[in-house]
Image: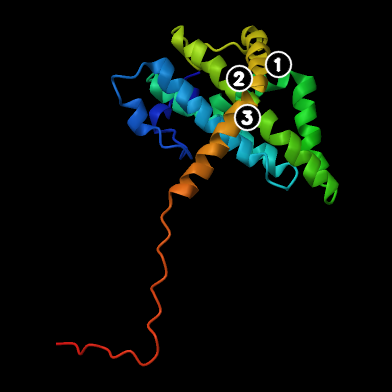
C-alpha cells in the first residue's frame, strides 16, 4: 500500500480540463467542484468516442477517466497514484455492467468495418463513453464525500451504485451533449467577422500622405 501513494501529489497527469481555479475556490462546495469535473471529462470522453480508429478510442476514454479520478482526488486533498487509479477504475468498469461495456467494445470494433462500421461506432461510442465516465466519477465522488480514499476503495461494494448511476447518466447524456453542441454553436455566432473594405473606384484621387 505504501508504494501506491509514495508519489501521491507528485503523480500528475495533465488534464484536458482546466480545474485548478475551480479546486481552489472556497465558495464552491467540494461536491459541486467534483460534479463540474465529472461532466467536463464526460464531454471529453464523448469526443474521444468519435475517433474512427478501433481500440484507440477505448484507450483514450480510459485515459480521460483516470485523469478525472486524479482531479477528484485533488479536490478532496487525497494522495493518489496512476497505478492505483487504473486498478480500481478497471475493477469497477470490468465487473459493474459487462453487457453494456461489451456493447461499447463492439461499437469500437465495428469501426474497423469501412464506412458503415465507422458510422455505427460513432453513433454508439460517444454516448456510452460519456455515461460511463459520469457514473464512474459519481462513484468516486460519493466515496470521497464519505471520507474514503483510493486505498480503502472497495470496487465490489460500489458496482451496484455504478450501475444505478450509469442508467441515470444514459438518460442525461443526450441533454449534456446537446447543450454542449448548442454552446459551441453559440460561440461561433458570437465571433465578429470583419467586413471587407469598400472598393475604391478607379481614377479616384488619393490624398497625399503628409
* Residue 151 visible at all: no
Residue 78: percent from left, percent from top: 41, 19
* Quadrant showing the C terminus: bottom left
Q: Which residue is mark 3?
A: 130
Secondary structure at numbered mark 3: helix
Disc nearer the start of the sequence (1/2) = 1
Tell me the CA gap for discs 2 and 3. 9 Å
Mark 1, Cα crowd under 10 Å, few <14 / some 14-19 / many 20+, is many
Tell me the CA gap for discs 1 and 2. 11 Å
Q: Which residue lies at the image location 79% right of the left edge and 28% below the top edge?
A: 103
Disc nearer the start of the sequence (2/3) = 3
Q: Are marks 1 and 3 in contact (CB under 8 Å)?
A: no
Mark 2, Cα crowd under 10 Å, few <14 / some 14-19 / many 20+, is many
Query: Which of the labelled discs sits on residue 135, or is there none?
Result: 2
Side of 42 relative to 53 (left or right) = left
Q: Which residue is mark 1?
A: 96
Mark 3, Cα crowd under 10 Å, few <14 / some 14-19 / many 20+, is many
Residue 88: percent from left, percent from top: 60, 20
Secondary structure at numbered mark 1: helix
Side of 170 relative to 183 (left or right) = right
Tell me the CA gap for discs 1 and 3. 16 Å
Residue 201: percent from left, percent from top: 39, 85
* Residue 155 visible at all: yes
Front residue of 11 and 201 = 201
Q: Is residue 166 above or below residue 41?
A: above
Q: Are marks 1 and 2 in contact (CB under 8 Å)?
A: yes
Front residue of 46 and 152 = 46
Secondary structure at numbered mark 2: helix
Q: Which residue lies at the image location 30% right of the left edge and 24% below the top edge?
A: 25
Colour mapping used in the image: rainbow
Front residue of 1 and 114 = 114
Amino acid at each position: 500500500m505504501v508504494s501506491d501513494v509514495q508519489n501521491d501529489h507528485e503523480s500528475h497527469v495533465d488534464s484536458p480540463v482546466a480545474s485548478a481555479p475551480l479546486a481552489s475556490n472556497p465558495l464552491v462546495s467540494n461536491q459541486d467542484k467534483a460534479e463540474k469535473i465529472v461532466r467536463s471529462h464526460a464531454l471529453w470522453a464523448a469526443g474521444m468516442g468519435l475517433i474512427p480508429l478501433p481500440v484507440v478510442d477505448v484507450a483514450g476514454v480510459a485515459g480521460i477517466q483516470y485523469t478525472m479520478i486524479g482531479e477528484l482526488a485533488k479536490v478532496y486533498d487525497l494522495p493518489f497514484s496512476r497505478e492505483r487509479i487504473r486498478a480500481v477504475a478497471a475493477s469497477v468498469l470490468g465487473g459493474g455492467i459487462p453487457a453494456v461495456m461489451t456493447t461499447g467494445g463492439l461499437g469500437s470494433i465495428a469501426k474497423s468495418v469501412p464506412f458503415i462500421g465507422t458510422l455505427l461506432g460513432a453513433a454508439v461510442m460517444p454516448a456510452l463513453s460519456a455515461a460511463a465516465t459520469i457514473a464512474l466519477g459519481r462513484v468516486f465522488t460519493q466515496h470521497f464525500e464519505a471520507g474514503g480514499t483510493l486505498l480503502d476503495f472497495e470496487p465490489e461494494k460500489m458496482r451496484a451504485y455504478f450501475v444505478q448511476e450509469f442508467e441515470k447518466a444514459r438518460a442525461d447524456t443526450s441533454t449534456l451533449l446537446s447543450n454542449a453542441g448548442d454552446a459551441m454553436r453559440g460561440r461561433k455566432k458570437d465571433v465578429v467577422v470583419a467586413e471587407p473594405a469598400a472598393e475604391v473606384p478607379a481614377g479616384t484621387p488619393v490624398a497625399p500622405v503628409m
